[in-house]
Amino acid sequence: MNPDRERPLSLTNILATTLEGMKATAQEALRPEVTEFYPENRPRLPQGTKAQLYVDPNDCISCYKCAKACPSDCIRIDSVRAPAGTLADTTDGHKRTFEVVRFDIDMGQCCYCGLCTGRSSYAPEEQRDDRGALGYADKDAACPTDCINFYPRFENGTEDPGNLMYHFAVYGFDAAREQWVAAAPNTKRSTHPEKAAADYDDPAAAAKAEELAHV
Amino acid sequence: MSHPKKSFWSIVDDDMLEQEKQLDSVHYGENSEATPYGPAETKLPEHPTPGARMTSAESGAYALRHDFRPYVQYVRREGNELGEQMIVNMGPQHPSTHGVLRVEVVLSGEEVEDLRCHIGYMHRCAEKESENSTYPQIVPYADRLDYVAPMTNAYCYSLAVERLARLSVSPEVEYFRIAINEIERIASHLLAIGTFGIDLGAFTPFLYAFEAREKILKFFEYISGGHLLYNYIWPGGVQRQPPADVKSRIEEILRDVETAMNTEINPVLTTNRVFIDRTAAVGVMTAEVALAYAITGPNLRGSGAKRDLRRDEPTPFYDTLDFEVCVGGGQFGPLGSALDRYIVRVAEITESIKIVRQCLSRFPDSGLDVHAGLPASWNVPSAECYFRAETARGELGVYLVSDGTNKPLRCKYRSPGFHAIQVIPEISRGQYLADLPVIIGSLDFVMCEVDR
């Protein structure tokens, strides 16, 4: 049917190519192994590897920039305004007025693009040059306070996909309120009159709040 | 070589349609008033342009209707001297189809009489999704078009957005991006070479190719953070600042790839007489056929047409680089065979190494301001742009329309693989079924890019 393909192989060619293959085999036999045996030898990933996302909620100012930057909508944030003076500043000096009561990341939806992350992910510490990458990474990173970043943990397999939803908020709403009460008992806490009434130590203020609640 | 000009699909004649109707009336009642899905009046209204959907014009069946019966099953016909005719489904889970391609083959004995490719198993609305995303958010989606060579896709998309938004990128960053782009081309061709060997039963070269490719992926992981999908090349620059030892690492990779090609892959596979005789006359695609089907990239150059967008329509600073456009020579058989396409890929690895070496001297060791080209706002002025660049598989076209907001009004890709699979019936008629994996492997398409 096809004359080219019915041409017999010449013996010289067969021998030559076989020897060529044997030569390569001999070279390979003397080479060190490249196969990594996984559970015994775990690779140490470079610092900026796009793997697990980690959020420090004490540095978060609830600007929602990461949630807006995410192409796959995997970040959910809820926050409430905390009473003045109850929240500490972030580590790089941003003022915090909102307490994060919910910061959930669905790692099953995450596409590991790094668009939400802070400046540390843009220029990991061990890769920064003498000019300091922070100067311009600062303006282009989504997170202004460097609170959401990758860290090189890659063994996130789970039997239940629900376990891929990671919760980073330290307190829920109720627990956060308890914290504020403990930190500053005499400040106005809630805009909701019924809830606020319980928070006031001053009986007169409580009565006023009670009154407002029934208006 | 006998080429049956009559298409299989014309076998479905009026008699068969009549039989189908009779069968329908048996199943669904005489007047077809009731279907298994409910009474006849609950049928969907007719689509105004049913031809635009997946229709079979001869049978008048609309694929999206409930009463659609997809396949005319098992047409037996008097075959030729090799045996009787039968239909074989290859895929969508067949490993040699390189993804989820379903090939419906009409066989006469062992000979392919006709075939039809079915796509759409991986369609995920990437273009529509892009229209609901901002310009930086589309880059991860552009990466996922062709997951074997994401950097080349992102490079093409980024340049398109830079045209649209009139961004300017410094020459140093451009040279750095070209170097990354060409390293990704090498990685993609290594995979194409390795899997082509696997399609022929040669397993060892695949391991050699993957070892070299893995080194490139590790390098990309070091600079971008991702092992396979990077989101690294951005409109206006790249995502992260390159580390200080990037040049020495690139040099190391190029040396490793050269060693793998010269001492491992070329002796074992490229110059192997058995390999050459197996592929030299298979899947012959002349330059006329290739151009008629809009084939681009190494598949077209394997047919002898010297066309390369890097040379013909150079993206910035490609014209300052010295490289050759590799074409197939047809030394071992007819020009445009599977072997020629393979040899073009092997030769392009050498050319890409040459390009990367030239780029290395043209960007600084440190202090590359990779974010200088980023705009303050992504509200792109109203305009439209079609931009095309040469990826590892051919011409990737990006059509973008902006309406002044930060999201494109329309985003459309022209992917090289979509055209490559359309030529499979043309070049595989009259070949053996065992040659079909060779033809499919030599075209080196990625279904992710075809379906989008």
Image: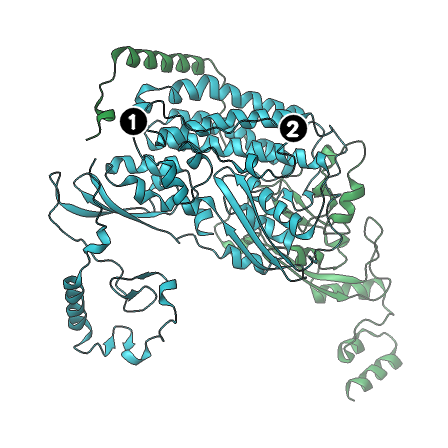
Residue B267 position by quadrant: top left
Q: Give the distance between the C-alpha atoms of the residues marked 2 and 1, in whole angstroms.
A: 38 Å
Residue in the image at 54% along x and 52% along y: A108
Label 2 Cα neighbours within 10 Å, binned few <14 / some 14-19 / many ≥20: many
Above or below, comparing residue A4 to residue A16 in the picture = below
Query: In the image, which lettered chain appears green?
Result: A
| SS for dot 1 | helix
Parent chain of label 1: B
Above or below, comparing residue B116 to residue B264 in the picture = below
Q: Quadrant of the N terminus of chain B?
A: top left
Q: Nearer the viewer, residue B148 or B281?
A: B281
What kind of residue is marked 2?
Cys
Answer with mark 2 or mark 1, whichever residue precedes in sequence. 1
Residue B273, given in percent of the width and then of the height, sits at 32, 19
Residue in the image at 25% along x and 62% along y: B58
Residue A170 position by quadrant: bottom right
* Residue A46 seen in render: no
Parent chain of label 2: B
Residue identified by numbered label 2: B359
Residue B212, given in percent of the width and then of the height, sits at 51, 26
In this picture, residue B101 sits left or right of residue B262 = left
Q: Nearer the viewer, residue B322 or B217?
A: B322
Residue A17, given in percent of the width and then of the height, sits at 34, 15
Number of numbered markers: 2
Circle 2/circle 1 CB separation < 8 Å? no
User: What hue does chain B carry in this figure?
Assistant: cyan
Residue identified by numbered label 1: B278
